[in-house]
Image (cartoon, rainbow, N blue to C red):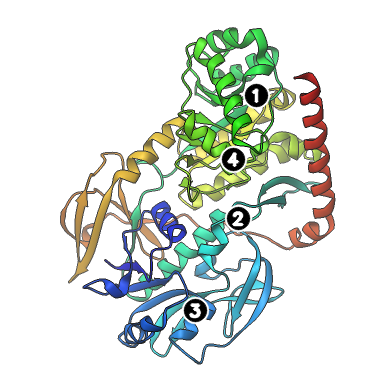
Amino acid sequence: MFVALLGSDPVWQELLRQEGVAFGLNAPESPEPPRILIIDRTPKLAEVAWLRRFAATGGSLVAFAPDAQAIWRGVQGRPVRIGSILPDDSTLFRNVGEVHVHTGGWIPSGATCGSVSGRGAVFAGRIEGSDCVLLPFDVGRLLAKVRSAARVFPARTTKPVFEKTAAVSRGDVRRLAANALRFLFARRGLPYVRLSYVPAGRAGTFGFRIDTDDDGFSAVQPAADLARQLVTKFTWFLATKALGDDLGRTVREALAGQDIQYHCFRHLVYPDYERSLKDFSQGLARLRKCGVKPTAAAAPYGEWNENWARAAVASGIGFSSEFCVAYDDLPFRVAGSDVLQVPVHPVCSSRLLAAGADEAELVDYFRRYALLQAARLEPCFLYDHPGKLMKVFEPMRRALSECSELSGGWTTMTEYAAWWLRREQVSYDWSVKENTLALKVEKAQADVRGVLEWPDSAAEARLESGTIALDSFERKALPSPVQFDPARLPRMVGRWRAQANETLRTLRRDGAKRKEANS
């Protein structure tokens, strides 16, 4: 096993499963030490001697910077409060956006990658002969809790584009951690080996989700016409009470052949389990009477809480999508929940219009996001609402058409989630000896591939036990990285965050009052 955790932190395990990296646990107890060690917790006193031997014999490490002091007493740094880390053109920040963390951190001396307040944030290099990456935050603690906050997104608009999302940009934390592994593998002259992010034979994939919210049949039908014009399926999350007596007609006529899932009965997120479960029971019962058996849900406003998630599990929901948990990321499971999260990009057309976007910028915004996801070799999922789509039907038709072409073709969120569940079944290990890759695979899936990444190229590998020469792989150039321009964004965040938070609070509060009054 090339990669192992010092312990068995569940958050790090989930991150590595997202990447599709083969890894081991509790490295000091393993009969064969790994080549790359992730220090996922503060080392115990009894482990310090083992860690020092590991580093002294050429082992590579990824660690929260102060934890590295157990190995190298000379590691220095300073505690800081980190709002976000700005990317640069180093390999560690390839295709990584602004990493929002909002946490206490520790900047190691000699850090040169990324920046916090104009100074380096991440150390990547050698210490006493050992290659290592020292991160300024504790990944496990950072991703263990779900927090939300207003977030401003970079756009070419006169006003800021904002939405309430996860406070931590989990996808960029994962990408930074994965790039740390890529860096350490490259230093050893080895490819970074992982499972594919998308089905075999595809460079990417694209899907579109629609939440019906308070819209009725008159808004849903023309939005469904957009799917038919594009000759594809959208994933529809239906708010059943708002559709009223038209729910059956909506399912039979407007959405015939589409991917229909569950949004809510009332467009509210309840803090307690009882009301959450009642909402699922009422809404799902109405859909089942129409012949629809949803396997997925999306909570109103993109919000999420543990009781809502418990109610989802009790209601037979297999996956959900809430951007207050995560956005712009690969699927994963929140610690303690069996529901798979399938993240989307949280900015919809109405947010862009409110910020002053014209039709050209509307198309270009989504196009830029699709290009970014294509460069990352990751899926691209966008979302919107029927009534809002009708105001920008033609530009959104162009945007969706372009995004599907840039991303490698259409899918639905349900199809992609089903593929991801098959991907989760795959178990494999690998080794390299004399330029030959040896694979040991269990529970292989025909549409899941292995991917080998070098600094400038990548190749797909069929997941079959056996050996193959590394120079026999058909390597293709990696897409050019998409550069993130943070020049304007920090000023906008500082200027507009308070306004964005207050605006979102007002919208949620007024909407909740109206719905409760009408319930």
- Could you tell which of marks 2 and 4 lies nearer the N-terminus? 2
Q: Earlier in the sequence, mark 2 or mark 1?
A: 2
Q: Crowding at label 2, few (<14), some or many (≥20) Cα neighbours within 10 Å? A: many
Residue sitting nearer the eye, 214 or 153: 214
Work out whether residue 266 can be spotted.
yes
Q: Which secondary structure, mark 1?
A: loop
Pointer 4: residues within 10 angstroms few (<14), some, or many (20+)? many
Instruction: Give x and y (percent) for residue 285.
Output: 53, 16
508 vs 135, nearest the viewer: 508
Seen in the image, is 213 located left or right of residue 456?
right
Tell me the number on the disc at residue 169.
2
Q: Amino acid at mark 1?
A: Thr
Q: Which residue is mark 3?
A: 67
Q: How far across and down, in percent of the image, does residue 338 sit?
A: 44, 41
The correct choice, above or below, for 181 with respect to 50 in the image is above
Check whether the beta carbons of the residues at disc 4 and disc 3 lie within 8 A of each other: no
Seen in the image, is 327 located left or right of residue 365? Answer: left
The local secondary structure at tag 4 comes to loop
Please tell me which of labels 4 and 1 falls first in the chain: 1
Across and down, in percent, residue 392 comes to 72, 27
